[in-house]
Amino acid sequence: MKKRVAAPILAVVLAIGGWFFGFNNESAKTSRGFTTESIPEQILDVKKEGLAPNKYINAYVVKVTDGDTLEVTYKGETQKVRLLCVDTPESVKQGVEGQPYSKEASEFTKKLALNQPAKLVFDKGLRDRYGRLLAYVVLKDDVFLNAVLVRNGYARVEIVSPNSSLKDYFNELQEKAIQEKEGFWGLKKEKQPFLPDKSGKYVPKYKLEEAS
């Protein structure tokens, strides 16, 4: 009799524990009005600290330059950071007129990340050609910023090798956002900042216009 009672109780405890620590596989709407997703195991499994591939640092966000670009302080130094696997509409790119939803994406990132502690997790490639750190950013309450931007229609997916381990994860989030018309996906097609190219990949609208 004890075994029959223990099993259901254990199942409930595990379910509650999984939800509390962010290991659930379901989307969840926060009290702040945006949808969150569980953090992938590839990120949770990174245990070693340091400015190096496949490691992490605990930093503090001091500036939001754009929806997908930050500045953080770490051990007394300021580091520029580019969020991995996402691309928000351009608001400050030289020679490019501000894209639709660029201000909304920038403001969204500011509200979540500015003046907040952040855990930066690195993939295989540590920096881009501009010297910026390439990172997955996890904020307080287990808010995975990169994923939240895509899931809520503030960013498209942009995978650049060698940082492609979460390609399927992000593509799935983008599909959900498109289907549910989240963020800029809810705009009329002519207003959307990203459109599919011949291969079906979503790219900035201005690049398609330049190529035509």
Image (tube, rainbow, N blue to C red):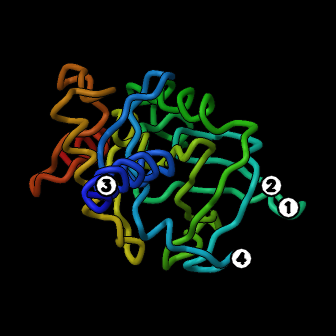
Element type where label 3 sits in the image: helix
Determine the secondary structure under disc 4. loop
| Mark 4–mark 1 CB contact (< 8 Å) | no
Residue 49 at x, y percent in the picture = 70, 75
Image coords of residue 157 (percent x, y): 32, 51
Where is mark 4, residue-wise?
50
As drawn, the label of residue 154 is none
Disc number for residue 73: 2
- Per the image, label 1 sits on a secondary structure element best described as strand
Q: Is residue 48 above or below residue 66?
A: below
* Lower sequence index among marks 3 and 2: 2
Can residue 87 be seen in the rendering of this structure? no
Question: Residue 176 location in percent, x, y?
Answer: 21, 40
Residue annotated with mark 1: 77
For the question of whether residue 71 can be seen, the reply is yes
SS assignment at label 2: strand
Q: Is residue 205 depicted above or below 129 in this figure?
A: above
Q: Label 3: which residue? A: 170
Q: Are marks 2 and 1 in contact (CB under 8 Å)?
A: yes
Q: Nearer the viewer, mark 4 or mark 1?
A: 4
